[in-house]
Image: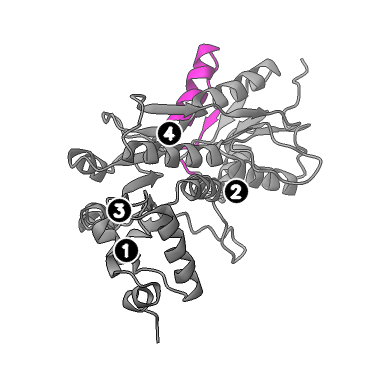
Amino acid sequence: MAVTIKDVAKAAGVSTASISRAFQDPPSPYLSEERRKFIRKLCDEMHYFPNIHSRRMSQKFANTIVLISRMMQENHSGGGFFQCDLNWGMTAQGIMSALCAAGKSLQIINCDERFIKEEKYLEVIRSHTADGILIWGALREDEYISKMQQENIPFVQLETFIDGLENNCVLADEYTGFQKIVERVISAGHRNIAVIAPSLKASTGVTRFSAVMETLEKHRITPVWVSENGSFDGDYGISCAGSILKEAPQTTCVIAPNDAVAWNCINVFREKNLRVPQDISVTGADGLQIPGELQLESFYLPSWEIGNTAASELCSLLYGTKTTEIFRVIPTIPIHGNSIAEVTK
């Protein structure tokens, strides 16, 4: 039979109220430190810990943070296995690191249409299940975020933002990251450039695509080929590579929206006996490390740093120490590979 609070109070010779006070954070002023340590030691020996739900009723914080995340792409890559979204994984690790230091736990919730329609995002705060919300990968059409703002729910967005809303966001400087990649391509002498567009459903895709097209336009370069649709899905690179070879055979360099798409392009080119970068150059983004002689021209997306910073920002928001800064932009780090060849005239 489980040990109850009454059992511990009887063994300690104190009231049940004193047992509850021994677990309060910050420490209760109505219980001496010596007494608190004695009770906590006895609780450990008797394997007692108060019911977390009962504690939440008397405390200001639930000490739980909810991470709302869009479903990660179920990409089988044609091989019958799932691929992990490394950006999401690193972001989650950064979040957990910050929350662990703050004494808070993490609950992950899939943000599907039912979740939005039934306004579950409001319920987790109204019911005091969680203290605040972290939102990863929100789409540009996600209107539920404005409702959260209207109810003054403490939340921070990670990696994406919503046009027209001024709320706390932690982002990567992806524009500069792609701008530097395009400048490197141009400085190598490439003018016959094919562009594979990212998905434009979220701000991160819009930012990446804008950086590529605006940098090319600045140099008065018109791409020889631009994909009609956009995606971050690695398999998208397979179809795009085939289209580039068929529709724009003069292409000397392919600018992909991320490393996953870039590597699948490279696989197609190799199957066609094209060498990278000698016959055709390819660039990526995100910093996916693949062992081998070929290393993509890319940039490191600071996903861990984004998660860690966002979680810390949310904790500061909860405790009333948040700064007035709305957007926190973390620099990307260039990765200079050997996937771009110099064009000889």
Residue at the far top in the pictured view: 219
- Helix, strand or loop status at disc 3: loop
* Rendered residue at 49%/70% (across/down): 44
Q: Amino acid at mark 1?
A: Ser
N-terminal-most mark, 3 or 1: 1
Circle 1 crowding by C-alpha within 10 Å: few under 14, some 14–19, many from 20: some
| Tag shown at residue 170 | 4
Q: Circle 2 sits on which residue?
A: 238
Total numbered badges shown on the rendered structure = 4
Give the percent coordinates (x, y) of residue 285.
59, 35
Give the percent coordinates (x, y) of residue 297.
68, 31
N-terminal-most mark, 1 or 4: 1
N-terminal-most mark, 3 or 4: 3
- Looking at this view, is 103 or 280 the one in front? 103
Q: Circle 3 sits on which residue?
A: 30
Q: Circle 1 sits on which residue?
A: 18
